[in-house]
Image: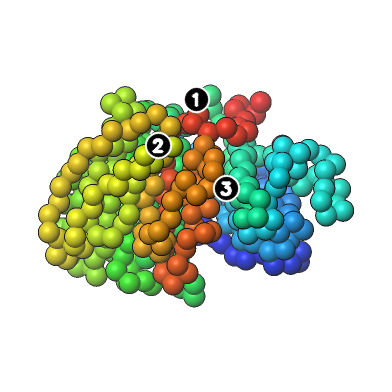
């Protein structure tokens, strides 16, 4: 089953296709009829809003699985006129298109998590998560939340990129890979790296990368980064080879994390593990070269305070090259953003 699906929405008839794909994923994940119904409504309203208010856009559905809990994330991205007053647009009955004005409000009410980011003249991004069962108090147990885009090159059935995370209370280990080239052979390299990563999560990032390097000799190789965020120690331990860009960003400062030249499974100049401080309010962003390198988060006022899924989505929307597989992984501490969340169904 695909973990993430994206397609353009350019007319109202495509809302039915969005609904069908979302419902199919919900059923595959074992959602009951009531929760599947919520997924169907959220997908339909999100797709309709794209056409009504922006003319067109992109809808992305992602399979979520954290600590054995399963969910679905629905994100919309557009380059429409944006919203002058997000709170006003969220109110039932408010509409700029002559419709009943219940779309955003119903999406928010039916979602376990909801967040939205909009810039006038630039566009809007919306994210909604629906979980199969009510989230437990204190979710996520790690205290760390992620947002991710991982999509194949247009025209390809599989992505040569991949990412993974393994979390414990107060810490998370992350992997981002970019198999050389694209297509099935690139995907093989990335998936091999992911299997080795999951089998060695007790090791330090540097040792994990060494194990991945050894395992990829029989593949075409990959660019790889491994990082561990430790909230108790307020540090990120990081290692990487190849052209995956990694940054720790705060409102005041951007720190670029050092990856070394080479290819895991090929020639590597060196493997070195480095430690960086993790400031309050920071976001960690790692992305493959399917995303252009010239972006700055500060060009999107207030985005750093949003859910990491919106950060990853906006970067993908505005800076994807469109000629390669693309992965964007954004990581933040829980509670470092303001959005609606439902705990224990309340």
Residue beneath label 1, please? Answer: 138
- How far apart are the alpha carbons under marks 1 and 3? 19 Å
Rendered location of residue 254, percent (x, y): 35, 43
User: Which quadrant holds the C terminus?
Assistant: top right
Q: Does 10 sit left or right of 303 as displayed? A: right
Q: Quadrant of residue 9?
A: bottom right
Frontmost of labels 3 and 2 is 2
Contact (Cβ within 8 Å) of mark 3 with mark 2: no
Between discs 3 and 2, the one toward the N terminus? 3
Contact (Cβ within 8 Å) of mark 1 with mark 2: no
**What residue do we see at 15% from left, 51% from top?**
271
Residue 21 is at least partly visible in this image: no
- How far apart are the alpha carbons under marks 1 and 2? 29 Å
Count of picture labels: 3
Residue beneath label 3, please? Answer: 73
Rendered location of residue 179, percent (x, y): 31, 65
Q: Residues within 10 Å of mark 3 (few under 14, many from 20)?
A: many
């Amino acid at each position: 089953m695909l973990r993430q699906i994206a397609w353009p929405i350019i007319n109202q008839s495509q809302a039915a296709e969005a609904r069908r794909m979302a419902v199919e994923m919900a059923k595959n994940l074992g959602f009951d009829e009531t929760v599947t119904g919520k997924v169907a409504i959220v997908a339909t309203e999100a797709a309709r809003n794209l056409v009504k208010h922006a003319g067109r856009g992109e809808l992305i559905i992602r399979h979520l699985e954290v600590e054995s809990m399963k969910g679905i994330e629905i994100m919309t991205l557009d380059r429409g006129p944006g919203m002058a007053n997000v709170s006003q647009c969220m109110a039932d009955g408010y509409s700029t298109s002559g419709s009943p004005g219940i779309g955003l409000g119903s999406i928010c009410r039916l979602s376990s998590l909801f967040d939205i980011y909009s810039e006038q003249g630039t566009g809007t991004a919306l994210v909604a998560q629906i979980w199969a069962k009510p989230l437990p108090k204190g979710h996520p147990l790690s205290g760390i939340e992620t947002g991710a885009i991982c999509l194949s090159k247009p025209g390809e059935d599989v992505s040569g990129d991949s990412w993974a995370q393994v979390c414990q209370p107060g810490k998370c280990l992350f992997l981002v890979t970019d198999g050389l080239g694209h297509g099935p052979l690139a995907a093989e390299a990335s998936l091999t790296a992911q299997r080795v990563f999951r089998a060695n999560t007790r090791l330090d990032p540097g040792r994990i990368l060494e194990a991945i390097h050894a395992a990829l000799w029989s593949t075409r190789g990959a660019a790889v980064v491994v990082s561990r965020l430790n909230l108790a120690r307020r540090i990120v331990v990081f290692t990487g080879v190849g052209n995956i860009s990694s940054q720790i960003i705060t409102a005041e400062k951007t720190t670029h994390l050092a990856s070394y030249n080479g290819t895991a499974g090929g020639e590597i100049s060196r493997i070195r593990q480095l430690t960086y401080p993790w400031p309050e309010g920071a976001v960690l962003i790692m992305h493959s070269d399917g995303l252009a390198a010239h972006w700055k988060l500060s060009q999107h006022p207030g985005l750093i305070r949003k859910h990491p899924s919106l950060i990853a989505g906006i970067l993908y929307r505005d800076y994807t090259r469109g000629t390669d597989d693309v992965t964007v992984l954004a990581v933040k501490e829980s509670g470092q953003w303001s959005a609606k969340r439902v705990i224990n169904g309340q």
